[in-house]
Image (cartoon, rainbow, N blue to C red):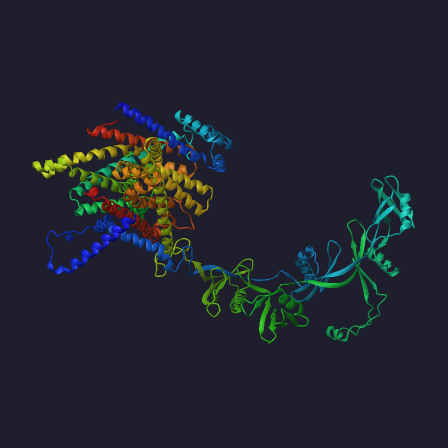
Amino acid sequence: MLKYTTKRLLYSAVILIFVMFIIYTLMYSMPTTYLEQKARELASKPGAGKSYDQWLEDLNAQYGMDKGLIAGYFTWVGTALRGEWGESWAWTVPVVEQFNNTVWYSFALGLVTLILQIIIAIPLGISAARRQYGFTDYFTSVVSMICISMPTFFLATLLKYIFSVQLGWLDLSGMQSRDYMYLSDFGKVLDVAEHFIMPAITLTVIGIGSLMRYTRTNMLEVLNSDYIRTARAKGVPEKKVINRHAFRNTLIPLVTTLGGSLTTLFSGALITETLFSIRGIGYASYHSMVQGDIPFTMFYLALISILTLLGNLITDLLYAAVDPRVRLS
Amino acid sequence: MANYKDLNEALKAKEARERAEQTAHADEGMHLDDVSRVKILSPGRQVTKRFMRNRLAIFGLYVLIIMFVFCFIGPLFYPYGQTEVFYKYDTISVDYALASETTSYTGYTVDEGVELERNVVSMMNTNIKAMEAGSLSEMNVSGSDGTLYGLEKLGEGIYTLSRYDAERLCTVGRTVLHVGLIDTITGEMSYSEGVDLGSAFVSAAAAACSGTEGEFEYGGTTYSFERAAGRRYDIYAANEGITYYAEAPGREFESALEAAIDNGDTMFSIDDPDAEPVLPAEGEEAAEGEEPAEPVVPQIEFDLHLDSDGNYSVYQIGEKHTGMVFTTFSPNMYNAGTSVTDEFRVGTLLSAYTTGEFTADGQDYTVEPDGEGGLLVRDSSGSEYADFTTFVIRRYDGKDTMSYALKSDIREVVAEMDESGEMRASVISQVPQQSADGGYQLDEDGNQILNDTELRITRRDTGEYVINCDQITYLIDLYAKPSAEHILGTDGDGFDVLSRVMYGGRISLMVGFVVVFLEIFLGVIMGGLAGYYGKWVDNLIMRLVDIFYCLPSMPIMIILGALMDALRMNTYVRLMLMMAALGIMGWAGIARMVRGQILSLREQEFMVATEATGIRVKDRIFRHLVPNVMPQLIVIATLNIGGVIITESTLSFLGLGVKHPLATWGTIINSVSSASAMSEYPFIWIPVGLLICFTVIAFNFVGDGLRDAYDPKAKR
């Protein structure tokens, strides 16, 4: 187990190096005029604190943009490994600080969404599988298909139109009401929670479709297996068959995938956060990317890549931990 | 292979025989275990049948067919293009016209051949004021170079500016004339223009010139010389007193000149010695109503001009040429829209107080004062053609395109306002509709479309009158509500939304297909190679797949979009690059699937057979292995198209994908994504969003249906 984990970690590191190389190449191939223009813009901002030359110098020192591709890449890897991620151009604070400022909003939003998804999707998926080709089955497959096919931006716009414009219940976007500063501490929490309603609904709807289908498929597989037939033959009550024998076995793939997706809680929701102006990591990175903020963008891309690889690793390890039949090698 | 063909024929014949036999014995009934009761379907038909049984898949298929007809065939029958701008008539309150009394004089060129100095032209208003103050009918002014100009009043409000022909007769004072350049070595002299003193002078000069400068005398005149370079000298003749440039008129002239200089006159004249005294013409005498005139000796006039170097120049004044005419009058044509040529205008002005007849642009006109301070022009048939007034009414852009009736309506009201001293008034008159380009809208007969409109006239402190009205104007039809004409309304550019949706759908669907094709192309090649060769090739390609699996595609697309924005890339290039990037980032999954399938297929007997028969490796992979992966490929392609459409529309919605003027479903929603537009114009974005949803759902249903049909075991 330990040996396998170590091996996978090393392997993931190699993959990461190559992934980051591709991303670095993308950044490296940005036309210099573009970088210069951005640096000039930064230097002319009020309170920039650094001159145009200094910005470019910092950039070169950290990213090796003035060196060759390979040499520059290792310059960057070196600084990144030392934890020197530099200062964000778009937010004018150190990248790590900006990450700390934003990530917990994303985490909260992600966690709420994940819980909602689990509560809604898994029971629906299981009941669909129990009555295959029944009304529930058709209903859930159509619903899940709609959820999968719904573009985030359309759903978000639709929710805004219904709840903000037509009904006027919620704010269109943002994280705080206008009178946020005058609220009590508890009131502040409630206020932010209220602003999280629409993003959470959006993310939940977008996400439940695939989870529902996944649950249904796995449940069907389990229900068709020999031990369920045996249990039924023995005369075990149907309720017990479903809730104990089948459900527990269905949980094996579910737990592994959900465990793997835990890492994505830290990567934020790029589109949804941007559309609702939730100042999470997704929102921050979207604006960094659009404004050519190389330090923050590189950090964010590295973060997502690491989280993806870590998620895969966790899935595999969990699979072995949950299912004793699986042997890792 | 010939045998097989024969066998095929034989089988077909046999089948036909059996069928004939069957129909012959049809009435005999069939045994329960008759073989012909079992229907055997080809694999293709089996799949089709299973697919047909899936209601959701059929629904999806219908939606897709409708969508394709809508996007690809719809535009052929839809009357509007995707970038066709629509207009509507609407009233907008505009400052329609400006009316004012002209007090300043504007000049029009009579004869382009007459050169007039700018300063003199720009001083005209001042000079005319001076003439009016002094009630002068003629005045002479001189330009900065001494040229004499004459101003003449033709009548009320019309002045002409003429230039006198003048010839420099002489200068008074010390003048230095460049005689020429002499080379003392060769003894050659090059005279200045117009000077030739003969070869005797040359030899005298050659002898005299030495040193750097000096003087010598020749023929009673003192010449000075100055070394130019080497042994070449410039020779100047200095002259004190009067230097003539032409034949001297005689003693009488010189005494007159001296008297003029003493008096500080700028003009003087002497009797023309060559001319006989003449009597004034009879007609003129009667017209001017003067005493019977004595014989008048024609005079030669001279202009005396003080040059900047302190000398006086004397010009003999010759004929005068009228160069410009200045006036406060502006023409109003009876037929609105008739253009006023300069020739017509000048002709009117010049003949208004004299002959009263003129020809302009090949037409004869008569002109007479109308008794109200204006001029009335009639054409050759005697009907009123135009009038000239000092009270000018013009469209706000300064152009004279208003009809005569409208002008006279306004003029009347303004006159009333003047009398009553009111600052505001209004009148209802007929104002023409405007077209898109600011011109007038014409009906089928070429007449202007007139609408009764209330004109509000306001007097300004400056004495101008501003005419404001709600003019019916041809406007771009922005954000029109859905109507029979525009089923989904129009968008912020005045484009028809439905046609945008059709053309946008083309691009959205095309992007989906192209990207998926690219993904499959790359995926099949990479997966096929990896699966077939195994070992290190497999390892290498699979590691590449791992890397591409890990690449965060959405952030990369956003960065690319922002980069292309910064580079201001052409929208078509953007589209290509976006498709390429999406394809390159999406092949890994397909490669993994193809490889997995091929790994298992490779071990099957038919592959052993291909190896045994020695088929080429390329054919083994792409003709025997890959076709067996086709079902999975078709399923994955169908499902992926939906995903690509969502990605593309999301990017376009964020403004990082396809750009104006190309439309995709994402950009159409993006154009109304701001909070206000979103709440105001749901009729634009809701249908488009639903369209995206339906298309993607349809692709997913069809993909699911195909998967179930190909692999019924997976469905269970």
Which one is in front, B273 or A130? Answer: A130
Residue B498 lies left or right of residue A143; in this view the side is right
Residue B467, relative to residue A172: is it above or below? below
Left or right: B660 as drawn, with respect to B145: left
Which residue is drawn at the image coordinates 18% and 52% (left, top)? B39
| Residue B285 in view here | yes
Please state if B386 lies on the left or on the right of B222 as rendered: left
- Estimate the x, y position of residue B619 in percent, counting from the top left: 34, 41
From the image, which quarter does the C terminus of chain B lie in? top left
Pinpoint residue A85: horizontal percent, then vertical percent.
41, 29
Q: Nearer the viewer, residue B7 or A71?
A: B7
Q: Is residue A300 left or right of residue A56?
A: left
| Residue B101 in the image: above or below residue B550 | below
* Residue B158: quarter of image: bottom right
Question: How many labels were placed on the picture?
Answer: 0
Q: Nearer the viewer, residue B114 or B280?
A: B114
List x then y, in percent, for residue B569: 46, 44
Q: Can residue A192 be spotted in the picture?
A: no
Q: x and y percent of residue B133 in the render?
A: 68, 61
